[in-house]
Image (cartoon, grey):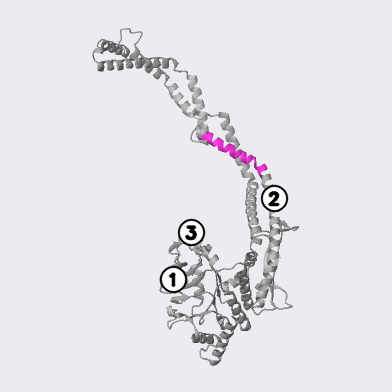
Amino acid sequence: MVVSVLEEMRIRSLGVIDDAVVELSPGFTAVTGETGAGKTMVVTSLGLLLGGRADAALVRIGARNAVVEGRIAVPQGSPAVVRAEEAGAELDEGTLLVSRTVSAEGRSRAHLGGRSVPVGLLAELADDLVAVHGQSDQQGLLKLSRQRQALDRYAGYAVAVPLGKYAEAYKRLRAVAAELEEITTRARERAQEADLLRFGLEEIAAVEPRAGEDTELAEEAERLGHAEALASAAAVAHAALAGNPEDPEGVDAGTLVAGAQRALEAVRAHDPALAALTDRIGEIGILLRDVAGELAGYADDLDADPLRLAAVEERRAALTALTRKYGEDVAGVLAWAERSAARLTELEGDDERIGELTAERDALRAELGALAQELSQARAEAAERFAAAVTEELASLAMPHARVSFEIRQTEDPDGVEVNGRTVAYGPSGVDEVELLLAPHPGAPPRPIAKGASGGELSRVMLAVEVVFAGTDPVPTYLFDEVDAGVGGKAAVEIGRRLARLAKKAQVVVVTHLPQVAAFADRQLLVEKTNDGSVTRSGVKVLEGEDRVRELSRMLAGQEDSETARAHAEELLAAARADA
């Protein structure tokens, strides 16, 4: 099976490293060097490539920025490739180029396959590419939440499926409980709001406004207020168009137009143009008679009743009182009434809604309890297998009598959910508190690893957990920063042997100070400083043959040329090769 492989990292201006290239390969690579030489910068660099937190303090003094570039060989179609291509990244012959830049001011930029990408995307890819473990990760394993997460990860679908259903029900229960609390705690405010809405709706209903009524009444008030002037103007205009009965000799527009038409009728036959003009004058005469008739009707129909004007003004005053409170015009008042009626229905339905929400809350709590019980059972079953697998791994790590187990417990809580006849506290991940216990030797009671494990034991427990994961939920590359801390002697040899076995399934990079571990590596890299205290391109080199023996001798005795140390180093290498 083709897996992803971290092939190379170039590190510039990061910590003590000036400019260095770390060449990696499949299998087991050990990174060694004097204390303070910059070995841990390898882990820090990879952390940056994988979306880790940027810190301006990492930038080498005097440099504008620190840059880490990585080249990762990835199989086509892998989740990491698919996600990278979705972000616009391009692969170079099956190789994914990743870079991270951190400025001296703390600003950070990330590039993937030649494209600028959010740093968060690198973190997403990290889940599919590399598992990084350092001293902080060992401390993280002491947290109960991390121990539960480790168990859930090992259990796989057996826990993931009920946990997904539980999470959905939990989210819905939180929403229902929040709405129920909002309704009940604001009951007084909601009652006051309902009273105000009810008063407003009753006030509007008493007036019974119609859409557009305010415009119609304004026009009518204007007409009634000027009735006499309008009637007089209409009479004068009518007389001018149709004549005044009291003045038979007077000349009006209708008579003049009729005379013009008669004069042209006598000669229209002699010229078509004049005939057309005659017709148009006839049309004018018809229009004049129509307008004169409408003016006469307008004058007859005009209402000059002062009582009607008073009624109109009174109605307008009533509408104005509404528009001052509820809208700019009658249309706005009617819109407010529609919205308020809907809101009032909602508020008046509080009692019914409270009943509905209470019933839904109780049903969800019952459902949550059943799912929590299913989730607890799945965790308990997985815990037995997980503990047995880790215990077996510890036997290969010079802890043959150690026993690992899990305690899964719940806390009584009267406001919790019912599980197996008990009311217990619950949260977004269920009702279980999961704690990893260790009995380091026969007769010792199982104790939480936070209290019962030494530094060396904790290192081996973490390694055993990761090896178990490698068999169930593997990642292509594992990087360990001094996973052998606090370990020596036979235990160190066993850790080296186990890392070598893990490297048969994945790429393993280990930063170590133990020669027993380094001897098992397929490749050993030495990180060393120059005289000015920096690590340059020549400061990270692959050790082979005599050089590797000298470095192992230094790690064993602090003396590269000690014959005894050299003999021991050669013996370690021979034993490691024989074990392979």
Q: Residues within 10 Å of mark 3 (few under 14, many from 20)?
A: few
Q: Magenta includes 337?
A: yes
**Residue 358, how many percent across, how many down?**
68, 48
Q: Are marks 3 and 1 in contact (CB under 8 Å)?
A: no
Instruction: Name which of mark 3 and mark 2 comes first in the sequence.
Output: 3
Marks 3 and 2: which is nearer the front? 3
Out of 63 and 68, give the one closest to the viewer.
68
Which residue carries the number 1 mark? 66
Q: Reply above or below: 492 against 77.
A: below
Instruction: Estimate the spatial distance between the alpha carbons at disc 3 and disc 2, rounded to whole Å.
Output: 42 Å
Measure how far apart labels 3 and 1 are at the Cα level. Answer: 27 Å
The amino acid at mark 3 is Glu
Query: Can you give x and y, in whole percent of width and height, for residue 48 in the image?
Result: 49, 69
- In the image, residue 189 sits, relative to residue 560, either above or below, namely above
Q: Earlier in the sequence, mark 2 or mark 1?
A: 1
Query: In this picture, which residue range is highlighted in magenta?
Result: 332-353
Q: Is residue 191 left or right of residue 446?
A: left
Label placed on residue 86: 3
SS for callout 2? helix
Q: Which three-letter amino acid code belongs to the residue tagged 2?
A: Ala
Indicate left or right for 113 with 493 as reference. left
Mark whose residue sits in front, 3 or 1: 3
Where in the figure is residue 545, as x and y percent of width and height?
50, 85
Q: Is residue 281 left or right of residue 413?
A: left
